[in-house]
Every structure is written in C-alpha cells, then in structure tokens.
Amino acid sequence: MTAFMLLLIGGLFVYGNWGEIAAIRHNPEFHFAIIFTLWTTMLATLLAGLTAIPCGYILARYNFPGKVLVDTLMDVPIVLPPLVSGVALLILFGPILGDSLARIGLDIVFSQRGVVLAQWFIATPFAIKTFKHAFSTIDLRLEKIARTLGYPPEKVFLKVTLPLAKNGLLGGLTMAWARTLGEFGATAMLAGIVRMKTETLSVAVFLNMSIGDLQFSLVIAVIMLLLALVLLTLLKIITKTEVHI
C-alpha cells in the first residue's frame, strides 16, 4: 500500500510539464483560486471547531434519551455522497429558507457564503467524532480534583479539560481543514461552479480539466497534495500522536 501511494503521488510530479509553472504563477485565476480556498477553508474549519467542541463534549460526557439517534445524525454527512449533501443544502437554503434569508441580506445559494456553508457541513462531523474521542479519554478524576480546589465548572473546562484534549482537538481541526480543502460535490451543488467567483482549488481542477488544460490542473492538484501532506506531517510531529477518527 505504501508503494502504491508513493507511485500515485509521484505520478503527479513526473507527468507534469513543470516548465509551465512560472506562467501559471502569474495566472489571475490561480491567484483567485488559492486565496479564495485558503480563506474559505480556514473560516469553515473555525466554524466547524466552534460547533464540534460542545457537540463532542456532550456526546462524550452525557447520556440522554435519543443519544444514539443524535450521534447517528452527526455522522450523516460522512456517509452521504457529497453531491447528495449538496442537493439537500440547495433545497434547504433555496426553496425552503431562501426567501426568508434573502430578506435579511443572506444569500446562500450560488454565493461565496454557500461555499463556506457547504465546507462547514461536510467537515464538522469529522471534527465532532475526533473531539468526542478526545474528551472521552480524559481522566475525570483530574477534573474532580480541580473542582475540589475551588474551580467553577467553566474554569475547569478552560484550564483542565481543553489542555488535556489539546492533541485530539488539533487532530480534529486538521482533519476538518483537510476535508474542506478537498470538498467539491456539496460546494458545486450549493454555490455553483463559477470561475473567479466560487472557484476553489478543487473547482479550478474540474473547470480546467473539462476544457483540456491538463497542466494547469496538475499544478493545482500538486499544490493541494503538498498542503495536505505538510500539514498532516507537522501535526503528527508536533503532537507526537496519530490523528484519530
């Protein structure tokens, strides 16, 4: 499997005509796609983290009626094909909620907001599962000791629980970011495939492959691959742990 992965990655580097990289660097479409991808994925990852912290904590620490159903619902975006998720989002923020949101100035469908929303929806379940695992592995005695020393519950959470879960939280955020980086299906359905408007790196690969510009697509594919590899490797080195899903 390792040999196969190395061949797969190496094929992108070997096949490309890297003499054209300099020209692509000055391409305005490339500049737009990479800047747009970075800020949308970072925003979506931040929102996913803010959503996943309470969700993961509650699922890890509390038992309540319907917990299995709630936990299953959190996993739905993982098992659904992204295109199906995109269709569901399109219906919800189009015919169902579209007019109400438009009246307050929140256009979601075929907009940059739609890109962030689709990325958030796809990535959040990965963060929830990882955060849940991180919170469930904490020794509860440490939190109880902090309470006996006079710490209120919110201070215990901030000073004890979050630091102990740090590696798991970083792993969850990394997985969420990696998922937003590669997201295409749900984004395409909800925000559309519009050059220089909702064009993420994934969309740029699709658009240019569809018109036969293989070299442009290869450069973007390699950049996305390197971003993911570097970030995942740094995370595992810094935290000295595996990323749990």
Image: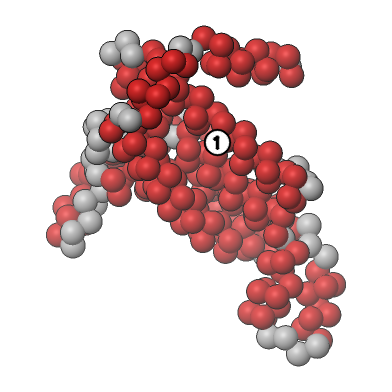
Residue 87 coordinates in the image, percent (x, y): 33, 34
Where does label 1 land, which residue?
Answer: 227
The quarter of the image holding the N terminus is top right
- View extreme (bottom): residue: 150
Residue sitting nearer the eye, 241 or 237 = 237
Local crowd size for mark 1, using a 10 Å CA cut-off: few (<14), some (14–19), many (≥20): few
Query: Considering the image in quadrants, where does the C terminus appear?
Result: top right
Q: Quadrant of residue 148?
A: bottom right
Nearest to the observer: residue 229 or residue 123: 229
Q: Position of residue 175 (x, y in %)?
A: 59, 43
Give the left or right position of residue 132, taking residue 119 as reference.
right
- The residue shown at (65%, 55%) is 169
In the displayed structure, 108 sits above or below 87; it is below
Is 201 displayed left or right of 70 in the figure? left
| Location of residue 25 (image quadrant) | top left
Q: Position of residue 166 (x, y in %)?
A: 70, 60
The colour scheme is secondary structure
Numbered marks: total: 1
**Secondary structure found at label 1:** helix
Image location of residue 84, percent across then percent down: 39, 31
Residue 161 visible, this orientation:
yes
Left of 91 or right of it: where is 84? Answer: right
Tell me what residue is drawn at x 66 percent, y 80 percent: 155
Give me the residue at 85% from left, 72% from top.
141
Amino acid identity at mark 1: Leu
Compare residues 104 and 238 and report the one nearer the observer: 238
Residue at 32% over, 10% down? 212
* Residue 87 seen in this snapshot: no
- Relative to 34, is 149 above or below? below
